[in-house]
Amino acid sequence: MSEAPVLHEIPAVPEQRTYSGLLIGLLVFAVLLALAGLIWSYSLAGRLTHAEAQLASTQQQNQQLASALDQTNARLRVTTETLGHSLGLTQKQLEERAQDLLRRQQADAKRLETEQAATKQQFGQQISSVSSDVSNVKTDVGGVKTDLNATKTQLQQAEAQLQSMKGDLGIQSGLIATNAREVDVLKHMGDRNIYEFTLRKGRREVVSTVALELKKADPKHSRFNMIVYSDDRAIQKKDRNLDEPIQFYTGKDHLLYELVVNNISKNQVQGYLATPKNAPVPVTPSGQ
């Protein structure tokens, strides 16, 4: 009889090792999870402490504000009661007036908004017109500058045409004008005071601080006779010519005055009197 083969049993060691490794992994994960929870709890506790501190501060501020508000309300009640007694009004009447004032303020604010909107719309409509007007003004300014330059050129030309000659006292005169345009040039130059005059025969006319009287006018020969009254003196100027500088001294400072007749007609002459800039100025100048 043959012997049956003997079967050797294999131990289950790998399965046991697998369970051990899994258990260790779970333990490590649990430890890590516990650490994370601990850290989160610590952080949460810190935040909670900070929030509680802020809440306490806020509550303290609210209490202070509430106390201040109570004080303000108390003062307002006292003021309102005092005002009511002063005006003879009850609390209800004061409240009604306050509500009425509030309604009027709201109505005024609404009206102001409406007016501002209308003004803005109108401004928007006018802006293009203003831009056009500005362009026109620039054009006009350019034209004025051109005219001013032309006038300046004409003035310079007119100044160049002015003459200087010796007067009847033998003294070299300043520039003289022979017509109204040149008289205007002398005025614009501003180095002397210019007083225009018109004299009629036999009539004494005050010009600046002196008086002039025409005695004779001869338009045919462009000659005339005149008397100058100055410093209680009567200075005779006979047979003087058209555009001739007629000179005389006057005043305590012995200032040289100069007159020119540049138009002679029957019984009448026209011209101007030139005085130094430092000469006395009449209160009411005539002949200007």
Image: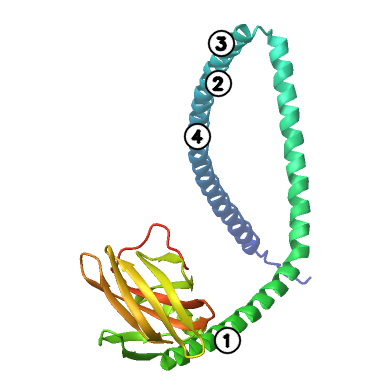
- Disc 2 marks which residue? 69
Q: Are marks 3 and 1 in contact (CB under 8 Å)?
A: no
The residue positioned 77% from the left and 41% from the top of the image is: 111
The disc label shown at residue 54, or none: 4
Q: Which residue is mark 1?
A: 146
What secondary structure is marked by label 2? helix
The residue type indicated by label 2 comes to Leu
Q: Left or right: 239 with respect to 14?
A: left
Circle 2 residues within 10 Å: few <14, some 14–19, many ≥20:
few
Which label sits in the foreground, 3 or 1? 1
Q: Earlier in the sequence, mark 1 or mark 2?
A: 2
The disc, 3 or 1, on the residue closer to the chain's N-terminal end is 3
Say which amino acid is labelled 1. Thr
Residue 260: image quadrant is bottom left
Front residue of 261/95: it is 261
Residue placed at 64% from the left, 79% from the top? 140
Q: Residue at x 48, y 79 (%)?
A: 184
Marks 2/4: CA–CA distance: 22 Å
In the image, which is nearer the foreground, mark 3 or mark 4? 3
Q: Position of residue 250 (x, y in %)?
A: 26, 69
**Which image quarter: residue 175?**
bottom left
Q: Amino acid at mark 3?
A: Val
Q: Residue at x 72, y 12 (%)?
A: 93
**First in sequence: mark 3 vs mark 2:** 2
